[in-house]
Amino acid sequence: MAEPLLAIRGISKSFGSVAANVDISFEVAAGEILGLIGPNGAGKSSLFNIIAGAIKPDRGEILFEGRRISGIGAVACARRGIGRTFQVVRSFDSMTVLENVMVGAFLHARRSAAAMREAAGVIAFCGLAGRRDVAAHRLSPPDKRRLEIARALATRPRLLLLDEMLTGLTPTEAREGMQLVRDLRAQGITIIMVEHVMEVLLPLIDRAIVLDLGRKLLEGRPAEIVRHPDVIRAYLGERYVA
Amino acid sequence: MAGVVRGTLAARRRREVLLGIAILAFLAVLPLGISNVYLRGLIVLALLYAGLSQAWNILGGYCGQISLGHALYFGIGAYTSTLLFTRLGISPLLGMFAGGLFSGLAAFLVGLPCFRLSGHYYAIATLVIGMMAALLAANWDFINAAEGITISFHGESWADLAFRTAILPFHYVMLAYAALIWLIAWLIEGSRWGFFWRAVKDDVAAARSLGISIYPSKLAAAAISGAATGIGGALYAQYVGFIDPESTLDLSLSVLIALPAVVGGIGTLWGPLLGAAVLIPVQQLSVAWLGSAAGGIDLMVYGALIMALALARPEGLVSFFQARARKEAAGHG
Amino acid sequence: MSATLIAQVAIGGLLMGLVYAVVAAGLTLIFGLMDVVNFAHGALLMVAMYATLLIHRATGLDPLVQLPLVALLLFGAGVVIYRGLIARTLSVRVNAGMVQIFVTFGLSIFLVGAAEFLFGSDFQSINASFLGGRSLAFGAIILPWPLVASGIVALLVFLGLFLLSRTEFGHALEATREDHEAVALIGIDRDRVFGIGWGIGTASVGIAGVMLANFYYIAPDVGTNFALIAYVTVALGGFGSIFGALIAGLIIGLVEALTALFIDPALKQIGIFLIYLAVLMIRPRGLFGHL
Ligand SMILES: Nc1ncnc2c1ncn2[C@@H]1O[C@H](COP(=O)(O)OP(=O)(O)O)[C@@H](O)[C@H]1O
Ligand SMILES: [Mg+2]
């Protein structure tokens, strides 16, 4: 295997007495769509925040394109080419959709005309062309998710982290969202997706990592994952009860 | 595609410049139609505060850092230019930029520790530093302590920015100041920095995830805001001819600098001007009409007005106009 | 400089610090409960002092006897301010923080103006109070009784606040500050808790006002200085921490007194400010603030 785009090595993180991540290791190849699944509280968002630099891990290291990124912080991670969305959507509410995405585009663009051009392209790509001049806080929930993706995309990331972008969407909206993810991959962007509802993710991803109670339960292709007894117990079991 | 985009944002910015020029033209001829000296003075003061509050708005409105200590930058500007003029004979035309430089530097230095704080901690820290400076200034003999400094008058002169009998020159000086700070705010709004600052104000975590460094952004906003405030302080000193710690460094001044932007519309281009146009006359007129007859009523009117406006229009007075513009846009679409 | 003098000044500073702490406790209680900084806090102190003065002039009641009366009065004022102004700011969706700052600033300006209008801006004072003029001697250390009594009353206020936190209402207060929305589900009326919280916060200031009226001048802007010290106290102790307010108040009283003694009375506040800035550099959220 060629050098992985992202290598996670022995990452652990505790919040007080809660062990959110325990000794997690895996690799992500360039061009892959990786699913990160597990029940609520499994430590998915925590791991995401660590990869994106928003949280410092207690132990372990992360390499991105062969360079160590653990501990350099969210700003530096974004500059290195890691884009992300948030589980609880964060938009710049005093700005329009276009302005929101321009903020991302300004990572590379110096002049506002260039940022505007770049943002317009990304907005169209994400299917928001019709809402470009709408204030961000007026968007519908699915459009807000698209806005977050567009904003991250405008920074020209090579790795994109999507946290529960399909959660709470109607089946039609979710299908549209999945199409967008496929389009992103076609652009050559590597994607890690978090989702706690497993079904929606399986047709989309190349590989999945299952987390439970902060630990990596297993790793494999979607078909292997669904059959695994541990997953059925830890994951589907929980879902059927709920 | 991109052409359509230019259509919206760029057109809005162009409209703002055109509106700015129209208002500038109106304000330029306004005093010619007013013979009442008192009224002219009122307009001069409103223009000064429009500029000062726009300067505050750069940090407080665009970058979202509520400073309650901007009197410090005003005072540094006023004292720098006045000391250079009275002690070294350097013209305030230069002195005001020296004042701006020092106050920008001061804002940067104040920001170094204070931007490690957030929310109320930041607001209180700026308030405390402002009060501390006022106290020190009132005890600092080099700048005449609490006694203050009188700028002696050697005849009307543009070179010295000194006018005693005529108010008109100061009208144009303050107009130029307000226009300059407005222009800076307009440029910032359309620039990379402006976008970054607004992102910092709206959501720090999201801003970081897009590669924006929060601390340097705030420091830059503070330095520009402080410098712009300091220039206003220098002009005020020339206008009034006398400065002391109480009139240039007090907490009430910090509040008065922030208020027009808050009342008019924080983080907007027209909020500070609109707020100053409403607030300064009310404040001054209530002093003039009520203050002498029955001390205190002026403050009551002023305080009640602040409460009423803040509660009735949390988005500021500009929202009256924005609501109409939005309705019109909806009508066209 | 004799050791007695230093001890006397230090004890006096600590006693004054207790008064600062009570003023700050009211501020920090309201802040902790609902995240609002009351910039009219100093004006309310002034209101309490004038109330004490007026009642004294009208009825001859000694300030000490007036304590419960003025505290109740200020409690009512706090509830009214919450209902009339603050509750409205909570429903504001944009710029809510800003609106709260400037509404309370506006209120402060209004109250100071009202005092100036009604009583003029001259300094006034209560001359013939029970405590006035008496002093307490420990050997060579002599302390004025009004100050000693203020310190004792301040400690009683903190004891009261501590006992309050153990009552059912105290628990409701705690639950409300933890989660404003969720308390509705367990049958707590948020508006009622906030209103009473404001009442208690302003009543604390009222008590401080009565005690100060015993020995301090009374004027429309007398609150400004105390409010400033209260903000520093709250920021130093940590926003929302009553215990932090007590400790910070003591530190500030002591530092102020010693700065005045060793450096210059005119610069006594500089000492406070420097301590505050130093602590903030090391602990940005104050001594006992939640991280
Ligand atoms: N910033 C944080 N502070 C405190 N605890 C946290 C934080 N982030 C996550 N946790 C805790 O870590 C555990 C894992 O949370 P999270 O990563 O959000 O799970 P998931 O995203 O898989 O639902 C939970 O118990 C959560 O309470
Ligand atoms: Mg999560």
Image (cartoon, rainbow, N blue to C red):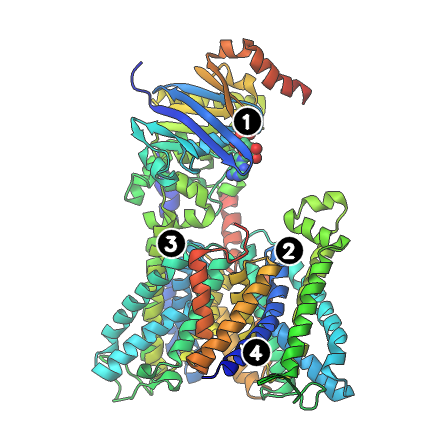
Residue B200 visible in the picture: yes
Q: Are marks 1 and 4 on the same chain?
A: no
- The three-letter code of the residue at mark 3 reads Lys
Q: Which residue is mark 4?
A: C12
**Displayed quadrant of residue C32:** bottom right
Q: Give the crowd class for mark 1: few <14, some 14-19, many >=20 residues within 10 Å.
A: many
Q: What's the residue at 30%, 26% (across, down)?
A: A65
- The three-letter code of the residue at mark 2 reads Leu
- The three-letter code of the residue at mark 4 reads Gly
Q: Which mark is residue C33?
A: 2
Q: Give the crowd class for mark 3: few <14, some 14-19, many >=20 residues within 10 Å.
A: many
Any atom of ligand 1 within 8 Å of the CB at mark 1?
Answer: yes
CB contact under 8 Å: marks 1 and 4 = no
Q: Which residue is mark 1?
A: A42
- The three-letter code of the residue at mark 1 reads Ala
Q: What's the residue at 41%, 21% (across, down)?
A: A26
Instruction: Return the chain for callout 2.
Output: C
How far apart, in angstroms, are the residues tagged by discs 1 and 3?
36 Å
How far apart, in angstroms, are the residues tagged by discs 2 and 3?
29 Å
How far apart, in angstroms, are the residues tagged by discs 1 and 4?
57 Å
Instruction: Return the chain for callout 3.
Output: B
Helix, strand or loop at label 4? It is helix
The percent coordinates of residue B229 (x first, y second) are 36, 67
CB contact under 8 Å: marks 1 and 2 = no
CB contact under 8 Å: marks 3 and 4 = no
